[in-house]
Image (cartoon, grey):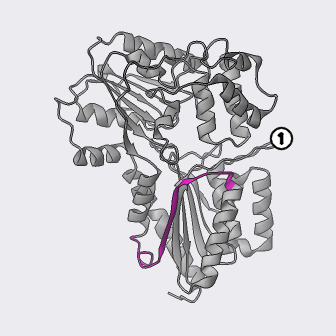
């Protein structure tokens, strides 16, 4: 009966995933925001719209309709494969997570779009995660290849997104307020769908609309901590001075603060509303841990697992645990398999909890975890009480090849790109071992 109960709960959670993703879609987020904070045409008259990132397609459609901005006065830039706005809205596609020559071309086309706008035109800028690599204009003498190399090396080293985006800002003319500088003196309003844990929403997309003070030598020192001597000479030269050449200058007056449409806190609230309303779950104690989960995925799973196990062994009731954030994965020497931080977090935690009856849901809200083509995983933990499966699972983690292993067991979640991006969600449901129905 215990296994049947867990399987039933697993199928029910899976059945609610479409509703969960619909509730965090750009259209739903915009409807909710403007319901609570109506904007009149006097406050923000129709003008132009720039949308960047994985959620750019939905943000363009929603904002253009709500604010009555004609399609020809919009430009949308999003990663290849993510849902675009409908036909008639000018759209550019770019690479993710590393920039390439298309990123350079997108920068030129974006600058032309801005240059064609009269100086009095109000501009709405919508930024979502996955923006940083779409538009590139490196500071001299940094080459595009060296800028991409720095980003890739930081990712492989397991650097947090705050460090990666700080490096992107220091090596770019468009990031760290560069887009705002290009738009000056046009009045601007910025909306953000944040994929960065905590109160760092301004860093989304590497802060194109928010001026960030550079300090080249400090950034170079930080890169050295992560990369050692693997820093290209062009990057060392650019960061040898406090203000890298080509970086935007401080604005004469501060920009108005951005409006954050959603963040990891939204992810937690929606998860609680959608999943905890399920029969049998609403009565369980909820432990809402954090919206700022960080650190190496396997290490984070070890810490979370010890806390959940301790609670399970000292109480007689089940429980639900929720957190959100963005962990990292340290990649050793290749070869590497197929996987990502969300899968490694979920599988590691499922292995940690193999002694208790539980479900682990680990989900990338953008629908694409690393190079896995999976959005995440959903597993019964006690399956890993089988020593053979446990060995295979730990082997998959060591090889960073979690996706084939989880897919083989039917634990993978496949959605394709969702058109939104709000960090990663982790939910653990611990069942009462004595319960039989």
Q: Check if residue 293 falls in the magenta segment.
A: yes
Q: Is residue 341 above or below residue 67?
A: below
Front residue (pair 221, 123): 221
Q: Position of residue 304 (x, y in %)?
A: 63, 65
From this viewpoint, is residue 407 visible? no
Q: Is residue 363 above or below residue 243?
A: below
Q: Quadrant of residue 43?
A: top left
Q: Position of residue 39 (x, y in %)?
A: 21, 37
Is 375 situated left or right of 257 in this image? Answer: right
Q: Position of residue 181 (x, y in %)?
A: 43, 17
How many numbered discs sit on the rendered protein? 1
Residue at 75 percent across and 62 percent down: it is 393
Residue at 37 percent across and 53 percent down: it is 23
From this viewpoint, is residue 314 visible? yes
Where does label 1 land, which residue?
333
Q: Check if residue 322 falls in the magenta segment.
A: no
Q: Is residue 22 above or below residue 109?
A: below
Q: Which residues are magenta?
A: 277-297
Is 434 situated left or right of 306 in this image? Answer: left
């Amino acid at each position: 009966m215990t296994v049947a109960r867990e399987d039933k709960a697993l199928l029910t959670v899976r059945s609610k995933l479409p509703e969960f993703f619909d509730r965090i879609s750009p259209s739903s987020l915009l409807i909710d925001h403007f319901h609570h904070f109506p904007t009149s045409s006097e406050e923000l008259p129709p003008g132009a719209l720039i949308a960047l990132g994985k959620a750019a397609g939905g943000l363009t459609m929603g904002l253009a309709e709500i604010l009555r901005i004609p399609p020809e006065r919009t430009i949308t830039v999003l990663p290849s494969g993510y849902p675009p706005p409908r036909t008639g809205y000018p759209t550019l596609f770019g690479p993710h997570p590393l920039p390439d020559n298309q990123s350079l071309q997108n920068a030129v086309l974006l600058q032309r779009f801005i240059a064609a706008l009269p100086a009095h035109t109000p501009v709405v800028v919508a930024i979502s995660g996955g923006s940083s690599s779409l538009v590139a204009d490196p500071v001299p003498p940094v080459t595009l290849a060296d800028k991409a190399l720095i980003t890739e090396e930081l990712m492989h080293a397991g650097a947090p997104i705050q460090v990666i985006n700080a490096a992107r800002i220091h090596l770019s003319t468009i990031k760290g307020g560069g887009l705002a500088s290009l738009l000056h003196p046009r009045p601007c309003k910025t909306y953000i769908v944040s994929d960065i844990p905590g109160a760092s929403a301004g860093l989304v997309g590497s802060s194109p609309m928010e001026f960030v003070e550079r300090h080249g030598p400090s950034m170079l020192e930080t890169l050295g901590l992560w990369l050692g001597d693997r820093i290209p000479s062009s990057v060392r030269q650019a960061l040898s001075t406090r203000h890298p050449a080509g970086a935007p200058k401080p604005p004469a007056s501060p920009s108005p603060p951005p409006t954050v449409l959603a963040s990891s806190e939204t992810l937690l609230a929606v998860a609680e509303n959608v999943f905890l309303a399920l029969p049998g779950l609403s009565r369980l104690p909820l432990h809402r841990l954090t919206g700022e989960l960080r650190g190496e995925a396997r290490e984070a799973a070890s810490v979370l697992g010890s806390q959940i196990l301790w609670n399970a062994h000292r109480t007689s009731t089940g429980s639900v645990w929720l957190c959100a954030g963005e962990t990292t994965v340290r990649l050793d020497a290749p070869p590497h398999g197929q996987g990502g931080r969300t899968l490694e977090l979920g599988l590691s935690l499922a292995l940690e909890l193999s002694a208790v009856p539980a479900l682990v849901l680990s989900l990338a809200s953008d629908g694409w975890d690393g190079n896995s083509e999976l959005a995440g995983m959903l597993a019964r933990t006690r399956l890993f009480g089988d020593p053979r499966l446990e060995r295979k699972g730990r082997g998959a983690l060591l090889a960073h090849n979690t996706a084939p292993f989880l897919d083989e067991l039917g634990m993978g979640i496949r959605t394709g790109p969702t058109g939104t991006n709000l960090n990663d969600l982790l939910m653990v449901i611990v069942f009462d071992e004595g319960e039989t129905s």
